[in-house]
Image: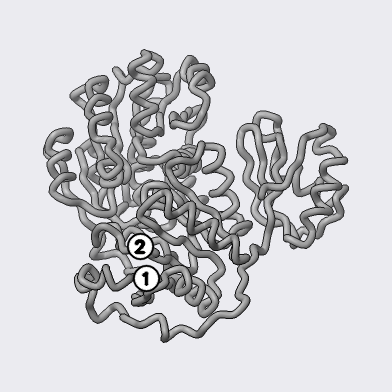
Protein backbone atom coordinates (compact mmCIF):
# COMPACT_ATOMS: atom_id res chain seq x y z
CA UNK A 1 0.00 0.00 0.00
CA UNK A 2 1.16 3.53 -0.77
CA UNK A 3 0.98 5.97 2.16
CA UNK A 4 -1.13 8.31 0.02
CA UNK A 5 -3.92 5.70 0.20
CA UNK A 6 -4.20 6.29 3.95
CA UNK A 7 -6.06 9.26 5.50
CA UNK A 8 -2.85 11.26 5.99
CA UNK A 9 -2.22 14.93 5.22
CA UNK A 10 -0.27 15.76 2.02
CA UNK A 11 2.48 17.19 4.26
CA UNK A 12 2.81 13.88 6.13
CA UNK A 13 2.90 11.86 2.88
CA UNK A 14 5.53 14.21 1.43
CA UNK A 15 7.70 13.90 4.56
CA UNK A 16 7.42 10.10 4.56
CA UNK A 17 8.42 10.03 0.91
CA UNK A 18 11.49 12.18 1.62
CA UNK A 19 12.47 9.77 4.42
CA UNK A 20 12.32 6.80 2.06
CA UNK A 21 8.92 5.48 3.17
CA UNK A 22 7.56 4.63 -0.27
CA UNK A 23 5.25 1.74 0.61
CA UNK A 24 3.87 0.37 3.86
CA UNK A 25 5.40 -2.67 5.51
CA UNK A 26 2.91 -5.43 6.53
CA UNK A 27 2.59 -4.13 10.10
CA UNK A 28 2.05 -0.55 8.89
CA UNK A 29 -0.52 -1.62 6.31
CA UNK A 30 -2.55 -3.64 8.80
CA UNK A 31 -2.19 -1.53 11.94
CA UNK A 32 -2.27 2.08 10.69
CA UNK A 33 -5.93 2.16 9.57
CA UNK A 34 -7.05 1.02 13.05
CA UNK A 35 -4.60 3.34 14.83
CA UNK A 36 -5.81 6.31 12.78
CA UNK A 37 -9.40 5.38 13.69
CA UNK A 38 -8.44 5.60 17.37
CA UNK A 39 -8.86 1.89 18.15
CA UNK A 40 -6.74 -0.04 20.64
CA UNK A 41 -4.27 -2.38 18.91
CA UNK A 42 -2.20 -5.34 20.10
CA UNK A 43 0.35 -6.06 17.38
CA UNK A 44 2.91 -8.81 16.97
CA UNK A 45 5.66 -7.87 14.54
CA UNK A 46 9.33 -8.74 14.18
CA UNK A 47 12.07 -6.32 15.22
CA UNK A 48 12.97 -4.23 12.17
CA UNK A 49 9.48 -4.56 10.64
CA UNK A 50 8.65 -0.84 10.81
CA UNK A 51 6.51 -0.90 13.96
CA UNK A 52 7.98 2.38 15.29
CA UNK A 53 6.78 4.16 12.16
CA UNK A 54 3.43 2.36 12.42
CA UNK A 55 2.55 3.85 15.81
CA UNK A 56 4.61 7.02 15.17
CA UNK A 57 2.69 8.02 12.04
CA UNK A 58 -0.56 7.27 13.86
CA UNK A 59 0.04 9.33 16.97
CA UNK A 60 1.72 12.23 15.13
CA UNK A 61 -1.18 12.46 12.66
CA UNK A 62 -3.69 12.94 15.48
CA UNK A 63 -1.59 15.41 17.46
CA UNK A 64 -3.00 18.86 18.22
CA UNK A 65 0.15 21.00 18.03
CA UNK A 66 -1.61 24.10 19.41
CA UNK A 67 -2.47 22.17 22.58
CA UNK A 68 0.88 22.29 24.41
CA UNK A 69 0.23 19.37 26.77
CA UNK A 70 1.40 15.74 26.87
CA UNK A 71 -0.92 13.95 24.46
CA UNK A 72 1.14 10.81 23.77
CA UNK A 73 3.33 8.61 25.95
CA UNK A 74 5.58 5.87 24.53
CA UNK A 75 7.07 3.46 27.08
CA UNK A 76 10.19 1.42 26.20
CA UNK A 77 12.13 -1.17 28.24
CA UNK A 78 15.55 0.48 27.82
CA UNK A 79 17.09 3.90 27.36
CA UNK A 80 18.67 2.81 24.07
CA UNK A 81 15.34 1.78 22.58
CA UNK A 82 13.71 4.99 23.85
CA UNK A 83 16.48 6.97 22.14
CA UNK A 84 15.87 5.13 18.83
CA UNK A 85 12.11 5.69 19.05
CA UNK A 86 12.49 9.39 19.89
CA UNK A 87 14.85 9.90 16.94
CA UNK A 88 12.45 8.18 14.54
CA UNK A 89 9.48 10.19 15.82
CA UNK A 90 11.43 13.44 15.39
CA UNK A 91 12.24 12.48 11.78
CA UNK A 92 8.58 11.86 10.97
CA UNK A 93 7.53 14.98 12.94
CA UNK A 94 9.20 17.20 10.33
CA UNK A 95 5.87 17.33 8.49
CA UNK A 96 4.66 19.95 10.98
CA UNK A 97 6.42 22.77 12.87
CA UNK A 98 6.76 23.06 16.65
CA UNK A 99 6.15 19.43 17.67
CA UNK A 100 8.06 18.86 20.90
CA UNK A 101 9.21 15.33 21.76
CA UNK A 102 10.91 14.78 25.13
CA UNK A 103 12.83 11.75 26.45
CA UNK A 104 12.51 10.71 30.10
CA UNK A 105 14.85 7.84 30.93
CA UNK A 106 17.10 6.73 33.76
CA UNK A 107 20.79 7.51 33.63
CA UNK A 108 20.06 11.15 32.77
CA UNK A 109 19.98 14.19 35.06
CA UNK A 110 16.61 14.35 36.83
CA UNK A 111 17.04 18.09 37.40
CA UNK A 112 17.62 18.75 33.71
CA UNK A 113 14.48 16.76 32.89
CA UNK A 114 12.54 18.86 35.40
CA UNK A 115 13.66 21.97 33.55
CA UNK A 116 12.56 20.55 30.20
CA UNK A 117 9.16 19.51 31.58
CA UNK A 118 8.48 23.06 32.81
CA UNK A 119 8.21 24.03 29.13
CA UNK A 120 5.82 21.11 28.42
CA UNK A 121 5.92 18.64 25.51
CA UNK A 122 3.48 16.98 23.10
CA UNK A 123 5.04 13.50 23.23
CA UNK A 124 7.00 11.76 25.99
CA UNK A 125 9.21 8.77 25.18
CA UNK A 126 10.60 7.08 28.26
CA UNK A 127 11.30 4.12 30.48
CA UNK A 128 8.63 3.14 33.06
CA UNK A 129 10.75 3.81 36.16
CA UNK A 130 11.76 7.36 35.27
CA UNK A 131 8.30 8.31 33.94
CA UNK A 132 6.70 7.04 37.17
CA UNK A 133 9.21 9.02 39.25
CA UNK A 134 8.18 12.24 37.47
CA UNK A 135 4.51 11.40 37.95
CA UNK A 136 5.00 10.83 41.68
CA UNK A 137 6.96 14.12 41.93
CA UNK A 138 4.08 15.82 40.03
CA UNK A 139 6.54 17.15 37.46
CA UNK A 140 4.66 15.24 34.73
CA UNK A 141 0.94 15.54 34.06
CA UNK A 142 -0.90 12.92 31.97
CA UNK A 143 -4.42 14.33 32.37
CA UNK A 144 -4.44 15.27 28.65
CA UNK A 145 -3.04 11.90 27.48
CA UNK A 146 -4.79 10.52 24.41
CA UNK A 147 -2.47 7.71 23.26
CA UNK A 148 -0.34 5.30 25.30
CA UNK A 149 2.15 3.01 23.52
CA UNK A 150 3.94 0.04 25.09
CA UNK A 151 6.83 -0.80 22.75
CA UNK A 152 8.41 -4.25 23.16
CA UNK A 153 5.83 -5.08 25.81
CA UNK A 154 7.15 -8.62 26.29
CA UNK A 155 10.58 -7.31 27.33
CA UNK A 156 9.00 -4.92 29.81
CA UNK A 157 7.30 -7.89 31.43
CA UNK A 158 10.57 -9.87 31.40
CA UNK A 159 12.37 -6.95 33.04
CA UNK A 160 9.80 -6.70 35.83
CA UNK A 161 8.21 -3.40 34.81
CA UNK A 162 4.62 -4.59 35.14
CA UNK A 163 4.07 -3.11 38.64
CA UNK A 164 5.50 0.24 37.57
CA UNK A 165 3.30 0.25 34.46
CA UNK A 166 0.22 -0.52 36.55
CA UNK A 167 1.12 2.30 38.99
CA UNK A 168 1.72 4.63 36.06
CA UNK A 169 -1.70 3.89 34.54
CA UNK A 170 -3.38 5.32 37.64
CA UNK A 171 -2.17 8.76 36.45
CA UNK A 172 -3.59 8.33 32.91
CA UNK A 173 -7.17 8.96 31.75
CA UNK A 174 -9.26 5.80 31.45
CA UNK A 175 -10.58 7.04 28.10
CA UNK A 176 -7.51 6.76 25.91
CA UNK A 177 -6.07 4.79 23.03
CA UNK A 178 -3.61 2.06 24.08
CA UNK A 179 -1.24 0.37 21.62
CA UNK A 180 0.85 -2.71 22.43
CA UNK A 181 3.71 -3.69 20.12
CA UNK A 182 5.99 -6.68 20.52
CA UNK A 183 7.98 -9.30 18.62
CA UNK A 184 6.38 -12.16 20.58
CA UNK A 185 3.24 -12.62 22.66
CA UNK A 186 2.42 -15.14 25.33
CA UNK A 187 -0.57 -15.61 27.64
CA UNK A 188 0.84 -13.05 30.08
CA UNK A 189 0.87 -10.36 27.40
CA UNK A 190 -2.70 -11.21 26.38
CA UNK A 191 -3.73 -10.95 30.02
CA UNK A 192 -2.14 -7.48 30.31
CA UNK A 193 -3.90 -6.46 27.08
CA UNK A 194 -7.27 -7.34 28.57
CA UNK A 195 -6.47 -5.33 31.69
CA UNK A 196 -5.32 -2.12 30.00
CA UNK A 197 -7.02 -2.16 26.57
CA UNK A 198 -10.60 -2.01 25.34
CA UNK A 199 -11.77 -4.21 22.46
CA UNK A 200 -8.22 -4.30 21.11
CA UNK A 201 -7.72 -5.27 17.47
CA UNK A 202 -5.23 -8.15 17.34
CA UNK A 203 -2.73 -7.98 14.48
CA UNK A 204 -0.02 -10.50 13.68
CA UNK A 205 2.20 -9.95 10.67
CA UNK A 206 5.18 -12.16 11.51
CA UNK A 207 3.96 -14.77 8.99
CA UNK A 208 4.03 -12.16 6.20
CA UNK A 209 7.47 -10.80 6.98
CA UNK A 210 10.45 -12.16 5.09
CA UNK A 211 12.41 -14.47 7.37
CA UNK A 212 15.97 -13.41 8.11
CA UNK A 213 18.57 -15.49 6.23
CA UNK A 214 20.34 -17.02 9.19
CA UNK A 215 22.60 -20.08 9.21
CA UNK A 216 22.20 -21.76 12.61
CA UNK A 217 24.99 -23.97 13.95
CA UNK A 218 25.21 -25.73 17.33
CA UNK A 219 28.61 -26.89 18.61
CA UNK A 220 29.07 -29.51 21.32
CA UNK A 221 32.14 -28.60 23.37
CA UNK A 222 33.90 -29.24 26.65
CA UNK A 223 35.76 -25.90 26.53
CA UNK A 224 33.48 -23.07 25.45
CA UNK A 225 36.16 -20.37 25.49
CA UNK A 226 38.42 -22.38 23.17
CA UNK A 227 35.54 -23.19 20.84
CA UNK A 228 34.48 -19.55 20.73
CA UNK A 229 38.00 -18.57 19.59
CA UNK A 230 37.88 -21.34 16.96
CA UNK A 231 34.54 -20.01 15.68
CA UNK A 232 35.90 -16.45 15.48
CA UNK A 233 39.11 -17.51 13.70
CA UNK A 234 37.18 -19.77 11.30
CA UNK A 235 34.55 -17.23 10.22
CA UNK A 236 36.45 -13.98 10.91
CA UNK A 237 33.25 -11.94 11.43
CA UNK A 238 33.35 -8.15 11.27
CA UNK A 239 31.23 -7.75 14.39
CA UNK A 240 29.67 -10.14 16.89
CA UNK A 241 27.29 -10.08 19.86
CA UNK A 242 28.07 -12.90 22.31
CA UNK A 243 25.23 -13.67 24.74
CA UNK A 244 25.75 -14.92 28.28
CA UNK A 245 23.09 -15.60 30.91
CA UNK A 246 24.72 -13.67 33.76
CA UNK A 247 26.37 -10.29 34.33
CA UNK A 248 29.43 -11.84 35.98
CA UNK A 249 30.01 -14.19 33.04
CA UNK A 250 29.66 -11.32 30.54
CA UNK A 251 32.32 -9.32 32.36
CA UNK A 252 34.70 -12.28 32.79
CA UNK A 253 34.36 -13.45 29.19
CA UNK A 254 35.12 -9.97 27.80
CA UNK A 255 38.22 -9.76 30.04
CA UNK A 256 39.39 -13.25 29.02
CA UNK A 257 39.05 -12.37 25.32
CA UNK A 258 40.98 -9.12 25.83
CA UNK A 259 43.77 -11.08 27.53
CA UNK A 260 44.33 -13.10 24.34
CA UNK A 261 44.25 -10.04 22.03
CA UNK A 262 40.65 -10.42 20.92
CA UNK A 263 38.93 -7.04 21.20
CA UNK A 264 35.77 -7.27 23.34
CA UNK A 265 33.62 -5.11 25.61
CA UNK A 266 30.88 -6.20 28.01
CA UNK A 267 27.48 -4.62 28.56
CA UNK A 268 25.41 -5.60 31.59
CA UNK A 269 23.13 -4.17 34.25
CA UNK A 270 25.90 -3.09 36.64
CA UNK A 271 27.28 -0.43 34.29
CA UNK A 272 26.60 3.25 34.86
CA UNK A 273 24.72 4.99 32.04
CA UNK A 274 27.83 6.80 30.76
CA UNK A 275 29.66 3.46 30.66
CA UNK A 276 26.82 1.90 28.65
CA UNK A 277 26.97 4.83 26.21
CA UNK A 278 30.72 4.44 25.78
CA UNK A 279 30.42 0.70 25.08
CA UNK A 280 27.50 1.03 22.66
CA UNK A 281 29.11 3.88 20.72
CA UNK A 282 32.32 1.87 20.27
CA UNK A 283 30.46 -1.22 19.07
CA UNK A 284 28.27 0.75 16.66
CA UNK A 285 31.17 2.73 15.15
CA UNK A 286 33.46 -0.32 14.68
CA UNK A 287 35.88 0.62 17.47
CA UNK A 288 35.03 -2.69 19.11
CA UNK A 289 34.49 -5.98 17.28
CA UNK A 290 32.82 -8.10 19.98
CA UNK A 291 30.08 -7.12 22.39
CA UNK A 292 29.48 -9.57 25.25
CA UNK A 293 25.98 -8.98 26.58
CA UNK A 294 23.19 -10.26 28.79
CA UNK A 295 19.70 -10.39 27.29
CA UNK A 296 18.34 -7.46 29.30
CA UNK A 297 21.37 -5.23 28.65
CA UNK A 298 21.28 -5.94 24.90
CA UNK A 299 17.65 -4.91 24.51
CA UNK A 300 17.33 -1.85 22.29
CA UNK A 301 20.73 -2.25 20.62
CA UNK A 302 20.10 -1.73 16.92
CA UNK A 303 23.03 -2.71 14.69
CA UNK A 304 21.71 -3.05 11.15
CA UNK A 305 24.62 -5.10 9.80
CA UNK A 306 25.63 -7.66 12.40
CA UNK A 307 27.75 -10.53 11.06
CA UNK A 308 27.25 -13.04 13.84
CA UNK A 309 25.42 -13.84 17.07
CA UNK A 310 26.91 -16.37 19.51
CA UNK A 311 24.95 -18.04 22.30
CA UNK A 312 27.78 -18.70 24.74
CA UNK A 313 25.09 -19.96 27.10
CA UNK A 314 21.91 -21.68 26.00
CA UNK A 315 19.06 -19.17 26.42
CA UNK A 316 16.37 -19.84 29.04
CA UNK A 317 13.70 -20.34 26.38
CA UNK A 318 13.04 -20.53 22.65
CA UNK A 319 11.57 -17.03 22.53
CA UNK A 320 14.83 -15.63 23.93
CA UNK A 321 16.75 -17.66 21.34
CA UNK A 322 14.60 -16.14 18.58
CA UNK A 323 15.20 -12.61 19.94
CA UNK A 324 18.95 -13.19 20.11
CA UNK A 325 19.54 -14.62 16.65
CA UNK A 326 17.08 -12.18 15.03
CA UNK A 327 19.70 -9.46 15.40
CA UNK A 328 21.74 -10.89 12.52
CA UNK A 329 20.72 -11.40 8.89
CA UNK A 330 18.69 -8.19 8.68
CA UNK A 331 17.88 -5.99 5.70
CA UNK A 332 18.51 -8.76 3.18
CA UNK A 333 21.95 -9.63 4.57
CA UNK A 334 22.90 -13.18 5.47
CA UNK A 335 23.57 -13.87 9.15
CA UNK A 336 25.22 -16.54 11.24
CA UNK A 337 24.01 -17.77 14.64
CA UNK A 338 26.33 -20.02 16.64
CA UNK A 339 25.28 -21.82 19.83
CA UNK A 340 27.77 -23.50 22.17
CA UNK A 341 26.64 -26.21 24.58
CA UNK A 342 28.36 -28.52 27.04
CA UNK A 343 27.56 -32.11 28.01
CA UNK A 344 25.38 -30.84 30.89
CA UNK A 345 23.16 -29.05 28.33
CA UNK A 346 22.64 -31.95 25.90
CA UNK A 347 19.07 -32.63 27.06
CA UNK A 348 18.05 -28.98 26.64
CA UNK A 349 19.51 -28.92 23.12
CA UNK A 350 17.11 -31.68 22.06
CA UNK A 351 14.33 -29.04 22.01
CA UNK A 352 16.21 -27.12 19.31
CA UNK A 353 16.76 -29.98 16.89
CA UNK A 354 15.12 -29.53 13.50
CA UNK A 355 16.08 -29.45 9.81
CA UNK A 356 16.94 -25.73 9.86
CA UNK A 357 19.85 -26.20 12.29
CA UNK A 358 23.19 -27.99 12.02
CA UNK A 359 24.56 -29.89 15.02
CA UNK A 360 28.34 -30.24 15.02
CA UNK A 361 31.33 -31.03 17.22
CA UNK A 362 33.95 -28.41 18.02
CA UNK A 363 36.48 -30.75 16.36
CA UNK A 364 34.82 -29.81 13.05
CA UNK A 365 36.45 -26.38 13.45
CA UNK A 366 40.12 -25.83 12.64
CA UNK A 367 42.53 -25.19 15.49
CA UNK A 368 43.37 -21.51 15.82
CA UNK A 369 46.94 -20.39 16.47
CA UNK A 370 47.85 -16.83 17.49
CA UNK A 371 44.47 -15.55 16.31
CA UNK A 372 43.78 -11.89 17.10
CA UNK A 373 40.86 -9.52 16.48
CA UNK A 374 41.67 -5.83 16.42
CA UNK A 375 39.14 -3.10 15.60
CA UNK A 376 39.33 -1.08 12.41
CA UNK A 377 38.71 2.17 14.30
CA UNK A 378 39.41 3.77 17.68
CA UNK A 379 37.04 6.33 19.21
CA UNK A 380 38.05 9.92 19.94
CA UNK A 381 35.92 11.76 22.53
CA UNK A 382 35.44 15.53 22.30
CA UNK A 383 34.05 17.23 25.42
CA UNK A 384 31.59 19.29 23.42
CA UNK A 385 28.23 18.48 21.87
CA UNK A 386 24.84 19.79 20.77
CA UNK A 387 24.60 22.21 23.70
CA UNK A 388 27.91 23.71 22.54
CA UNK A 389 26.56 24.04 18.97
CA UNK A 390 29.04 21.39 17.75
CA UNK A 391 27.96 19.72 14.50
CA UNK A 392 29.34 16.75 12.56
CA UNK A 393 30.58 19.11 9.85
CA UNK A 394 32.61 21.07 12.41
CA UNK A 395 34.38 17.93 13.60
CA UNK A 396 34.93 16.68 10.07
CA UNK A 397 36.38 20.07 9.11
CA UNK A 398 38.74 20.17 12.09
CA UNK A 399 39.96 16.62 11.46
CA UNK A 400 40.47 16.95 7.71
CA UNK A 401 41.79 20.51 8.00
CA UNK A 402 44.02 21.23 10.99
CA UNK A 403 44.52 17.55 11.89
CA UNK A 404 45.28 16.65 8.27
CA UNK A 405 43.28 13.41 8.10
CA UNK A 406 41.78 12.05 4.90
CA UNK A 407 37.99 11.83 4.96
CA UNK A 408 38.25 8.08 4.33
CA UNK A 409 40.07 7.68 7.69
CA UNK A 410 37.11 9.08 9.63
CA UNK A 411 34.23 6.77 10.53
CA UNK A 412 30.92 7.29 12.32
CA UNK A 413 30.32 10.54 14.22
CA UNK A 414 27.89 10.58 17.19
CA UNK A 415 26.97 13.87 18.83
CA UNK A 416 25.27 14.01 22.23
CA UNK A 417 24.36 17.00 24.40
CA UNK A 418 27.79 17.51 25.99
CA UNK A 419 30.04 15.01 24.21
CA UNK A 420 30.89 13.92 20.69
CA UNK A 421 32.37 10.60 19.57
CA UNK A 422 34.37 10.20 16.36
CA UNK A 423 35.68 6.88 15.00
CA UNK A 424 39.21 7.30 13.63
CA UNK A 425 41.15 4.69 11.66
CA UNK A 426 43.39 2.96 14.24
CA UNK A 427 46.75 3.90 12.71
CA UNK A 428 45.89 7.62 12.73
CA UNK A 429 44.36 7.86 16.22
CA UNK A 430 47.42 9.21 18.07
CA UNK A 431 48.11 11.86 15.45
CA UNK A 432 44.44 12.92 15.31
CA UNK A 433 44.28 13.12 19.11
CA UNK A 434 47.47 15.20 19.36
CA UNK A 435 46.48 17.66 16.66
CA UNK A 436 42.86 18.07 17.75
CA UNK A 437 43.84 18.45 21.40
CA UNK A 438 46.21 21.30 20.56
CA UNK A 439 43.86 22.90 18.02
CA UNK A 440 40.36 24.40 18.07
CA UNK A 441 36.88 23.46 16.86
CA UNK A 442 34.71 26.37 15.71
CA UNK A 443 37.27 28.68 17.29
CA UNK A 444 36.86 27.03 20.70
CA UNK A 445 39.15 24.82 22.74
CA UNK A 446 37.67 21.46 23.79
CA UNK A 447 39.18 18.61 25.81
CA UNK A 448 39.87 15.60 23.58
CA UNK A 449 40.72 12.06 24.71
CA UNK A 450 40.92 8.51 23.38
CA UNK A 451 38.23 6.07 24.54
CA UNK A 452 39.75 2.71 25.47
Horizontally, residue 420 falls left or right of residue 25, namely right
Residue at point 13% right, 34% down?
195
Residue 372 location, quadrant: bottom right
The structure residue drawn at horizontal position 82% and vertical position 44%, both measured from the top left corner, is 436
**Which labelled disc corresponds to residue 240?**
none
- Image coloring type: one colour
Q: Quadrant of residue 446?
A: top right
Residue 261 vs 267, above or below: the answer is below
Which residue is more in the foreground, 159 or 104?
159
> Is residue 273 something one can see in this rendering?
yes
User: For this rendering, which residue is in front, 157 or 440?
Assistant: 157
Total residue callouts = 2
> Residue 132: x and y, percent?
33, 24
**Side of 59 where 377 appears, left or right:** right
Residue 99 sits above or below residue 319 on the image: above
Which residue is at the front of the view, 217 or 424? 217
- The residue labelled by disc 1 is 340
Pointer 1 or 2: first along the chain: 2
In the rendered structure, the answer to whether residue 297 lies left or right of residue 412 reads: left
Q: Position of residue 451 (x, y in %)?
A: 67, 47
Mark 2 Cα shell of 10 Å, populated few (<14), some (14-19), many (≥20): some
In the image: residue 376, left or right of residue 271: right
Q: Does the residue at mark 1 contact the one at mark 2 (Cβ under 8 Å)?
A: yes
Residue 311, position as x, y percentages in the image: 38, 65
Callout 2: SS: loop
Q: On the image, numbered disc 2 is attached to which residue?
A: 313
Q: Which residue is drawn at 52% across and 17% down?
A: 115
In what quadrant of the picture does the N terminus appear? bottom left
| Residue located at (40% from left, 33% from top) | 126
| SS state under label 1 | strand
Residue 217 is at least partly visible in this image: no
* Residue 286, above or below 145: below
Amino acid sequence: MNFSQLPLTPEMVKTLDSLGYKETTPIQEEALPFILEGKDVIAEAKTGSGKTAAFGIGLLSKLNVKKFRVQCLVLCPTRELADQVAKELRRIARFKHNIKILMLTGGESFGRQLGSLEHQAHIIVGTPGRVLKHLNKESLDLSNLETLVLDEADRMLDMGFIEEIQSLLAFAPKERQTLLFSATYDDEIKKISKEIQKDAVSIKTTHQEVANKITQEFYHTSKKMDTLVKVLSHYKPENVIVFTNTKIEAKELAENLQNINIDALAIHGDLEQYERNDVLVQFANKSCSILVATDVAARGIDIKELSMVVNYDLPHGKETYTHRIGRTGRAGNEGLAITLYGSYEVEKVEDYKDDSRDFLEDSDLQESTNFEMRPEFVTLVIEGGKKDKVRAGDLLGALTGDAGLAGSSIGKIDIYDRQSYVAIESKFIDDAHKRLNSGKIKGKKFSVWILK
